[in-house]
Image (cartoon, rainbow, N blue to C red):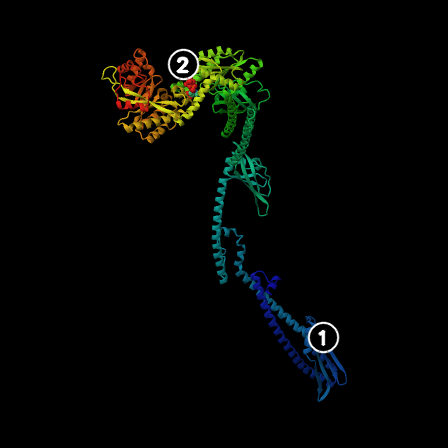
Amino acid sequence: MLDTIDRMRLVPRSLAGRVIALFGLVIISFACVGLGMFYRLQFLQHIDETQDNAITLIEVAAQAVEDGALIGDYDTVDRTLARMMVRSPFKRATFIDLGGGVITIEAPFEPGATPAPGWLARRIGGELVDINRVVSAGGKDYGVLRLAFDERKLAAQLWALVLQTVSLTAVAVALALVLSRWLLARWLHNLGRLRFYEADDDAADGGADIFSSEAVGSDTPLEIREAIQAVNRSAASMRDQYGQRIDTLMHSLVQHKSALDQAAIVCEVDRDGRVTAVNEQFVRQSGVAREQLVGSALSRLGGGWTASNLVWRGEVAVPAPGGEHHCWRTIVPIVDHAGGVEKYICIDFDISERKQFEDAIVRSAMRQGLLARLGRKALEAGPLQELFDMATLLACDGLEVRHAVLFGFDLEDGSAAARAASGFPPGVLKAPFPHLAGPASSDRLGAWSVRVLGPDHAGSGIEAFVVCSDRLYGALGVYAPAQRTFQEDEEAFLNSLANILASAVEREDAKNRLTWLAQFDTLTGLPNRRRLAACLEDAIAGAAQRDGRAGVMFIDLDRFKSVNDMLGHSAGDALLVQAGRRLQDCVGAHDVVARLGGDEFAVVLPALVAATEAEPVARRIVDALAQPFTLQGQQLFVSASVGIAAWPDDGADADTLLKSADTAMYSAKNSGRNNYQFYVPEMNADAALRLQTEHQLHLALERGEFELHYQPKVRLGSGHGAGSLNGAVTGFEALLRWRHPQRGLVAPVEFMSILEETGMILAVGEWVIGEACRQLRTWSAVLQEVPPVAINLSARQLGQAGFAETVRAIVAAAGVDPRLLEFELTESMLMADPESAVTILQCLKAQGMRLSVDDFGTGYSSLAYLKRFPLDALKIDRTFVRDLPADSDDAAITKAVISLAHSLHLRVVAEGVETAAHLRALQAYGCDEIQGYYISRPLPAQACAGWLTQGAELAA
Ligand SMILES: Nc1nc2c(ncn2[C@@H]2O[C@H](COP(=O)(O)OP(=O)(O)OP(=O)(O)O)[C@@H](O)[C@H]2O)c(=O)[nH]1
């Protein structure tokens, strides 16, 4: 119900209005009830009083009427009635006499009375009863007096009363309400201020109470006073709280702003896009004074922004003193209360570094792509010139320059010339580039490029050298017309291009070299066996065509091995090179000199008419190679054996022809070397024999056809006069013999070289060591003292990996005292690789074996090494002994060797002692031991028994 009333807006909104309305309602209710009851009472009383007054009045009037009627004075009656009607509640008075006469008097009209409502008159009419009075006098009735009430008059009187009281009551109520309103307004006055407190800046800002104690009147009701105080307290508390919150917010706002200022370039822009404020970073980055910045259009500071009410984001390039800055820009519109754009905040993050990084990545990827293109091109293995052209093009593209040149260097004089160029206007590089004389360096090349290319093309530039593994091939240069600083990554790119070129050049070189290697000898640069065969075939074809002859010579250097052994492999190489040159000098322009391998050469003579035409050439060759060679400052003599074969007599094809020449060469060797031989078919028989021997040698070891003979060495005494032996066998030298089932005992000279050449010497050498050990054990079983046995080692054995260990195993297996073994090595074997010889000898020595140098004096020895070898003895070669004592040179050499050996604390053994004169001379020179036919020939093991048991009972 209240809600309905409220909705109908019947209830006042203000508190005062409501109190007044309530109060008015109560007063009016009371007034209505009170007045209603009062009017009812007045109404009844008035009716009663009117009735009573009318009765009284009619009694009085009846007296007068009776008097008049008695006397028949009807005028009196009439006047009486009229008087009675004045100010009476009747409307009419009627006297009806018995005769039927009727006197009727109507009440006069009384103006001014307020007409009453009809219902009231009807109600009064209903309550009042007209009064009738019988007029009698003297017991006699004269008529009837009748008074009719004027209910409207009475109602008007009553209504006037109602109106008066109602008016008075209304005035009283109104006054009461006005008073109440005034009091309420006064008491509630302070509450009303609440409404305006918000707008009261002074109060809000000053933090004053809402209601000051002065403002609150003294008559303010207690409840309101308390409420005001509560409000004041709440307001103070709220003010505190909000104050703190606002302080915190302001603080964090300031922090955020300073953080933003640190992190970003910020400016404020008005609605028209003009800068109104900038932060410090903005000023710093732009390099423009703040005053100039403020007021300028933001669009002038980079970016294609136009003012709008939307957030704008994008990448902008901002002009700056040192170039452009790249920024990520966000422009935020700030909206006012009305929803319109008030201003813009523009926030820039400097992304220049990231941009540079991204650009660098893009550039790097682009360059990688270019490198890959060049790499692919290089792999195609097409012509190098195409690759060079592409490299200069890609260098221009990758480094964004217009000019690139690939210079090629000449190793001989260091001059440079353009191999490829890109980006030059037509004509600039038409003429060949002038050469840069002298060795190229980056500085020289740079200066030269500027001069050659001209400052228009080469204001600045960089070069990357194309460095192949063995030479400086060239340089790849890029040039910019203006001054430009080339960065590290750009140099790296250029270097990578140059490296690809270097790899391609190397591969091309390698390919060429492989092709060359397949046909030429690396050491001498001469054609090799394969190319020789081709040349020979061509020569044969040519000879066949012209019905002539084609010749081939097979040339083998004599005893070349000893050069290697004496002076080392590199000296041997040098000799081979010199020999090759000499051969070339000996032949004609159409003849071909080839190296077949080792110390073997061949010469193709394609244009012979008769085979004999080869003879002068062969002679020249033999003579030329017989001339001394100078190696390591020494003169060395090496002769050559030459075999000659001619097509078609000595062979129908190249192979056969070469084989025939080879056979003829062997024949020349067998004929004492240093000569030439024409092939004759009989030579094949010798070669066949050699082949057969080689084959049989392979089987000899398994078949047990080898045996050892032992030649004794004896001590040379000094106490028994000249020529006497001291009598002690100091040891035996084991010598290899081959007992061929058909040929009987074969001389070592016939098979030793084959064993050496074929490498069978290794297996046979091991057999020799084992056999010597077995023999020593046999002797040890029957004799108390067994002299040591010396074994000759070959160079191959010494060079065999793990040789010392092999020896140790053989000796250990045989159970022989290692001190009973002695190894003899030649000087040249030791000096071929002295360092490894020292190592091997030390291993053997450590096992207890003895070591001696064989054939001392025929080879070349370094005294420094001789001192380092752990030797026990030197064996003077038989060639020095042979002519003793007559040959004074040999005597001098022998004495010197003995003296040298003794000063190195080595025993001296003289080989080849065949006469008493030899013996005496050696004894006189102080030689320690001798060996030779004069003492004994080499003997089978069983024949040595006498030597072992008889001791030195030798016939002088
Ligand atoms: N320095 C050097 N030596 C080589 C080369 N190729 C092979 N030899 C050696 O050349 C020697 C060839 O020796 P041979 O021709 O068998 O024997 P030789 O000592 O010349 O004796 P004869 O030929 O019988 O007169 C061997 O010792 C090889 O090791 C080489 O390229 N350089």
CB at mark 2 closer than 8 A to ligand 1?
no
Task: Point out the tag, 2 or 1, that comes first from the N-terminus.
Answer: 1
Q: Position of residue 330 (x, y in %)?
A: 55, 41
Q: Front-most of 588 and 543?
A: 543
Q: Front-most of 41 and 394?
A: 394
* Quadrant assignment, res 395: top right
Q: Position of residue 947 (x, y in %)?
A: 28, 22
- Where does label 2 land, which residue? 637
Q: Is residue 532 visible?
A: no
Three-letter residue code for mark 2:
Phe
Query: Which residue reaches farthest bottom?
Result: 139
- Residue at 49%, 24% in the rendered image: 468
Q: Residues within 10 Å of mark 1 (few under 14, many from 20)?
A: some
Above/below status of 158 relative to 656: below
Element class at badge 1 = loop
Element class at badge 2 = loop
- Residue at 57%, 66% in the rendered image: 23
* Marks 2 and 1, how far apart at CA: 199 Å
